Amino acid sequence: MAGGWSKDGAVQEQIDSTIEDALERARSELPSGESLAYCEECGEAIPQARREAIKGVRLCIACQSERDKQRTAVSGYNRRGSKDSQLR
């Protein structure tokens, strides 16, 4: 059901677009390449199980946890479908 000037399925397209953007962002942040034996932040050894589980891992668990805490939240609002973004 569409309303106003939007076509049928427009809401679902916005939802799909938001999900695709989030997946693309998450995939771009995945490590790649050879895993390091020692953390590039603190120099502590990275356990073999972690290196095998996550290809391309570069940080120990403690440093990765700290980096995750400092990461800024990404807005889940899809600006492409926003009326405000069309007015600017």
Image (cartoon, helix red, strand yellow):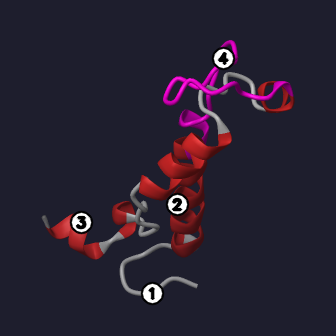
Dot placed on the residue nearer the N-terminal end, 3 or 1: 1
Question: Mark 3 and 1 residues: CB-CB less than 8 Å, in contact?
Answer: no
Q: Which amino acid does label 3 sit on?
A: Ser
Q: Quarter of the image containing the N terminus?
A: bottom right
Dot placed on the residue nearer the N-terminal end, 3 or 4: 4
Dot placed on the residue nearer the N-terminal end, 2 or 3: 2
Looking at this view, is 69 or 22 the one in front? 69
Write down the quadrant of residue 6 in the picture. bottom left
Q: Which of marks 3 and 4 is in front?
A: 4
Q: Which of marks 2 and 1 is in front?
A: 2
Bounds of the magenta segment: 26-48
The tag on residue 36 is 4
Q: Badge 3: few (under 14), some or many (20 or more) residues near its Cα, within 10 Å?
A: few
Which residue shows up at 23% across the image and 66% down it? 85
Q: Which amino acid does label 1 sit on?
A: Gly
Q: Which of marks 3 and 1 is in front?
A: 3
| Relative image position of residue 7 (x, y in whole percent) | 48, 72
Element marked by disc 1 = loop
The tag on residue 18 is 2
The tag on residue 85 is 3
| Relative image position of residue 83 (x, y in whole percent) | 28, 74
- CA distance separating discs 2 and 4: 33 Å
